[in-house]
Amino acid sequence: MSAAVYDLGAWLSLPGATTLELLMRLLLAVALGGLIGYERERSDKPAGFRTNILICLGAALFTEMSVLLAAIDAVPAGAGDPTRIAAQIVSGMGFLGAGTIIQARGSVRGLTTAATLWSVAAIGMAAGGGAYALAIGATFIVIVILAVFGRIERLVMNKSFERLVQITFEPRPELLEIVHEIMDDSGLRIEMVDIEKKPTAFTIALQTSGPRARWEAALRRLLEAPGITKVTPL
């Protein structure tokens, strides 16, 4: 085996890149991940400052190491594939992102957080690969999407819209009053379209109108109400 395997200089150098430059790439990844993490921390999201920094740093380091391992003299010519380790970052982030998605009784939350972590990993790969302008530009694009587009999204969600919902509950008349109370408390206007009574369950179809955010809050309350067995938006 070649002595180059034990040569730290070979492990800490890339064609055209010094050890200092490799370390600077890692620091850049820390800074870019920190910018996005700061925005997430201010928005009180579960994946905040440190999480985004570590993901960006890890992706950058994996990218550097994938090239380093393929470039050492011990690897036969043409046998090293610098994309092999880096490619696993994408699939690995898929598993990590899935852990941030919470699904509870029809409500899916955390998709934006998962997508953000995926993008942060890509930024880290760009920084680790020496694509500085690409990494910095992508960072500011992500921040704009999270901060500015988030406000636009909230404005859209607060606009009034109509939605038909079908609610099934136990055959108890008081539950119908609970449904109306939840809708009224949420500030939604409702019109009973149809009601079907069976010995085992009551089913009503309601036409609702109001801000989307309030409708989603009402939907969560309906799903949590005792005696209500099914809520189906139509």
Image (cartoon, rainbow, N blue to C red):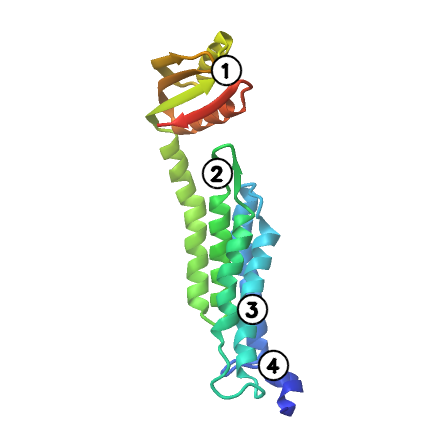
Q: Quadrant of the N terminus?
A: bottom right
Q: In the rendering, at what x and y percent does residue 65 appear?
A: 57, 74
The residue sitting at 52% across, 63% down in the picture is: 89
Q: Residue furthest right?
A: 6
Pointer 2 residue: 108
Q: Do tag 4 and tag 3 residues touch (Cβ < 8 Å)?
A: no
Q: In the rendering, at what x and y percent does residue 108 appear?
A: 48, 38
- Find the distance from the CA under tag 1 to the CA under tag 4: 68 Å
Pointer 3 residue: 62
- Find the distance from the CA under tag 2 to the CA under tag 4: 44 Å
Q: Residue furthest bottom?
A: 2
Is residue 89 in view?
Answer: yes
**In the image, which is nearer the foreground, mark 3 or mark 1?**
1
**SS at mark 4 in the image:** helix
- Find the distance from the CA under tag 3 to the CA under tag 1: 55 Å
Q: Residues within 10 Å of mark 2 (few under 14, many from 20)?
A: few
Pointer 4 residue: 11
Pointer 1 residue: 170
Q: Residues within 10 Å of mark 1 (few under 14, many from 20)?
A: many
Specify which label sits upstream in the sequence, 2 or 4. Answer: 4
Specify which label sits upstream in the sequence, 4 or 3. Answer: 4
Specify which label sits upstream in the sequence, 1 or 2. Answer: 2
**In the image, which is nearer the foreground, mark 2 or mark 4?**
2
Specify the amino acid type for callout 1. Glu
Specify the amino acid type for callout 4. Trp
Q: Compared to 61, does 172 lie above or below?
A: above
Query: Which quadrant would residue 157 be assigned to in this image?
Result: top left
Query: Which quadrant would residue 202 be assigned to in this image?
Result: top left
